[in-house]
Amino acid sequence: MMDVFPYLVAGWVFLTGCYGLATSRNLIHAVGCLSVCQAGTYVLLLAVGYRDGATAPVFSDLKPGSRPVVDPVVQALTLTDVVVGATVTALLLALVVQISKRHGTVDPDELSELRG
Amino acid sequence: MNGWILAAAVVLGGGVGATVWGVATGPLRRRVVAQNLCTAFACPALLLLSQGYDRPSYVDLALVLALLGPVGTLVFARLLADELAADPPSAWGLTYAAAAVGAVVVPALCVATGPSRAMAKLLVVGALLIGGNLLASRALSGAFPEVRRG
Amino acid sequence: MNARTTLLASAELLGWWAALAVLWLVFISTVDTLELAVGAGVACLGALAARAARRAVTGR
Amino acid sequence: MADAVIVVALLLVALSATAAVAVRDPARQALVLSVLGLVLAVLFTVLQAPDVALSQLAVGSALTPLLLLLAVHKVRRRGKKEGHHR
Amino acid sequence: MSRRARLWLVAVGGAGLAALFVAAALDLPAFGGDHHPYGDRAVHAALTRRTANVIASVNFDQRAFDTLGEMTILFAAVIGCVILLRRTHDEHRGRPAPEKVARPVRRYSLLVLPVALLTGLYVIAHGQLSPGGGFQGGVVAATSLHLLYLGADYRALERVRPVALYETGDAIATSAYVVTGLAGLIGGSAFLANTVLPYGTFNTLSSGGTVPLLNAAVGMEVACAVVVLLARFLDQTVEIEEGNGK
């Protein structure tokens, strides 16, 4: 069970975010759901890199080779994406603010009616 | 699995689990209190994990959380001020209970570490955590006499 | 800017600098010359920020 | 047994992610998202990724809630003004 | 598309994706397995370059070009925000009334601001040794400045935060990263190759060749980027009002 449980949690988080994104009535809420989707990908990546009984490959307080270490490559991928993802969230929120200025609403359904 | 990690799992399952439930349901005043308490429980859990994994460098996580957690709560206190003023939260029992968790965990870890610079760092984290959380929950409840700037 | 305000300003900066330098010593794990130099510089920045923030809030 | 703390952290993440989607009001969702960020940071710590956890803490505890709430304020203030005009 | 049709589409697509995902997850190597060929090689490579934090070594040495891409996304996102949230000609800058702030909150902000700034710089400076680095420390340092908004009001923050300076800092930091990469090219090897500086002593601030430099450049870029982003959002929320409504 434990062999796949973390992967399934990652999938659940991702799909929940997608559901929220599709049914959202408010674009700010949709941006929040998108960050939930992102969180799912982080969980999946880090779960792939985990090794039982290992510790982080950070040797400031650890003698190299004394303990097994987890995979640093997936961690490096996730690490940059967390911060870059936050700025992309900011960009999307800026778009939402702009939409509300132009059209006076942030409900996606009303917006598609406006377009005709 | 050692005792420290077990203790961290208990704090996470009990404390943080309760705050996740509290933040997801109920009126706004309960949600902001739960968000504040989440910091107060997660930070001691991170300290316990650092000791459990025998990695002193993980203390940096708790340090950053102790600094920025109350800042996050102050953000909510400032930007949701109008809604909170109509229905101010007050949960002093829970706040002091959460502070007590921090106040128990930090000395225990200090004893385990022994007198050194690492112990001083733990004490700094503990002081920032408890001070920040008490202040943040007072700011939420609006118990302060307000002053105008300047 | 008379002698009194200069003295007060430098006392404020020096106090913050000392406190932040001690904090840096608490944070780091190994002590060597480069660490101390970087710590002194960073504490300097922090002290300047602390004074600027205090002045911005009190408006003086 | 050694996995108990990982299971606890995973369950907390799944719960708070579901809550973050189910809560429909953006201001209340910002509160849940800030808790989700914290729980994710704890999960990353137990998965032995302290760097990622630090990233998540720095971003999730103050920055993301601030951005979301500022956007909510701007949109709401506009909405109120429109209401007055009509 | 109607709401109902969209829900059906999501349900069908989601169910398909879930089925495929579960099938894939069952075939993935088991969680916590011992087989990590890339990870073991990355750890080995980092240790030969005397970088104590292997994640920093992967980010700023072994995959430094990839990080340049991430930085570019960040930079582009900031430019996008600045353009989207600029003041248009039918808007004007209002003067917000001073906020009421409780005295203990103000004292707390003034006390924690320098401490948080110091912590942020500590996290950046020790990026190649202990957990942390430019991305995390930059965000912490930038957040610390905004304590002034929480502890007083937006006018106090504006007094210590000239936005133009941070916009310039953002650009300078991005170019510093590229220039460090070009130094590798001039030094006779590849772009962003870590061959220019000596590797130094393991587990000290100067170890790891160009890793600390790239780390500092990223830290400065992220800090400036976050300050600029928040400045635009705060401008929109606190100061800018539409001209026609008044």
Image: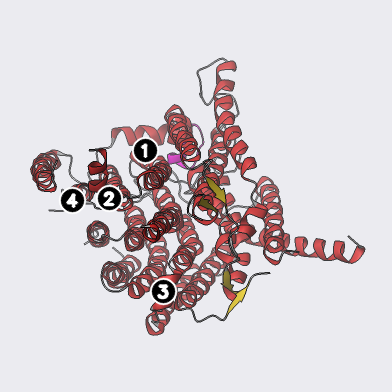
Magenta stretch? E49-57
Residue E64 in the image: state x and y as whole percent. Answer: 46, 30
Chain ID of residue with mark 3: B
Decide which of E153, E15 is in the foreground and name it. Answer: E153
Q: Is residue B93 magenta?
A: no
Rendered-image quadrant of the C terminus of chain A:
top left
Residue B125, placed above or below residue D77: below
Label 2 sits on a secondary structure element that is loop
Tag 3 residue: B84
Q: Are marks 4 and 2 in contact (CB under 8 Å)?
A: no
Is label 4 on the same chain as label 1?
yes
Task: Point out the frontmost of discs 2 and 1.
Answer: 2
**Comes first in the chain, label 2 or label 1:** 1
Q: CA distance from mark 2 to mark 1?
A: 34 Å
Q: Amino acid at mark 2?
A: Asp
Is the residue at mark 1 from the same chain as the one at mark 3?
no
Protein chain holding label 1: A
Label 4, on which residue?
A12
Task: Name the kind of residue labelled 1 in the image.
Answer: Leu
**Residues at marks 4 and 1 touching, judged by CB atoms closer than 8 Å:** no
Residue found at x 45% / y 50%: A62
The residue carrying mark 2 is: A107
Of circles 4 and 2, which is in front? 2
The amino acid marked with disc number 4 is: Trp
- Whether discs 3 and 2 lie on one chain: the answer is no
- Asked if both marks, 3 and 4, belong to the same chain, the answer given is no
